[in-house]
Image: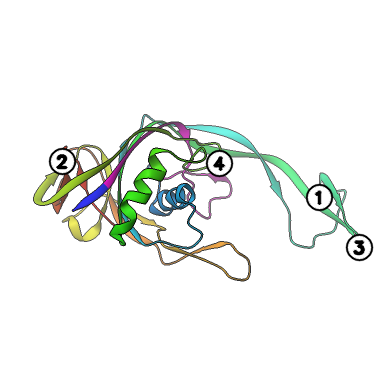
Amino acid sequence: MKVIRLTIKQNLANYRKPLNYQIKESYPLPPYSTIIGMIHKACGFTEYHPMKISIQGNTNSSISDIYTKYSFSKGAKFDEERHTIRIPSENKTYGVTKGVGNIELIQDIDLIIHIYPINEDEISYIYEKLLKPDTYLALGRHEDLIDIQEVKIVECIEEDMVDTKKTIYVPMELVNEGKTIYSLPKEFYIDEETGLRRFKKPIKVYLLNEGEIIKRTYIDEDKYPVALC
């Protein structure tokens, strides 16, 4: 089986967990939806293209930083006691509150991502677009740019009892047990009314550390596990 292997680096990134408002917490590695969204942007895909992804990597630690946040309610009129920014319109003046929030940033990130499009005819196209992207690509926030180290099409074979080389997300059926479980978004669709992405039911995976065992999965030609999900 042939897959695309993408090796990247990032200095800082936030892979935001949903529903965190007091502090923007981060997943330890980017979730599947973040990787797939980046691939779709690189390729210019305007609708969802099914693909399986394997995500592994090393990071240093996390730090806390601050950012400027803006809060508003739909249709809320400007109130001098509540709002700090006045936005005039034709019929009334709206109010926005400007404040400071906290964000968790992951440092010194090295990622190895394997990409297997369900339509295997797309392998060459995705490979070319990642090798020579038309624009700067990011993972996490818009400013979390990636430094692409390698894009390569590699051959994979299936093996029993595979050792992990880095921290890695693994589908639960490939592991006897694990300490940490994440529910990660993956598939999305475009809402016809709003044009926004909407996510389907998240996928539960284990997060394994270096040196743990996967019961049965693929490995690439350099012996990296390929735990596709």
Is 133 in front, or is 138? 133
Mark 3 secondary-structure assignment? loop
* Quarter of image, res 7: top left
- Residue under numbered circle 4: 142
Q: Nearer the viewer, mark 3 or mark 4?
A: 4
Q: Residue at x 47, y 36 (%)?
A: 13
Residue lying at 25% horizontally and 37% vertically, measured from the top left:
166
Q: Is residue 101 above or below residue 72?
A: above
Residue 181 visible in rendering: no
Return the residue at label 2: 221
Q: Is residue 186 left or right of residue 224?
A: right
Q: Which mark is residue 91?
A: 3
Q: Earlier in the sequence, mark 3 or mark 2?
A: 3
Q: For the residue carrying disc 1, how many other residues have a C-alpha within 10 Å: few (<14), some (14-19), or many (20+)?
A: few
Q: Quadrant of residue 192?
A: bottom right
Q: Nearer the viewer, mark 1 or mark 2?
A: 2
In x, y percent, where is residue 194? 63, 66
User: Which portion, as a residue range, is magenta?
Assistant: 4-27
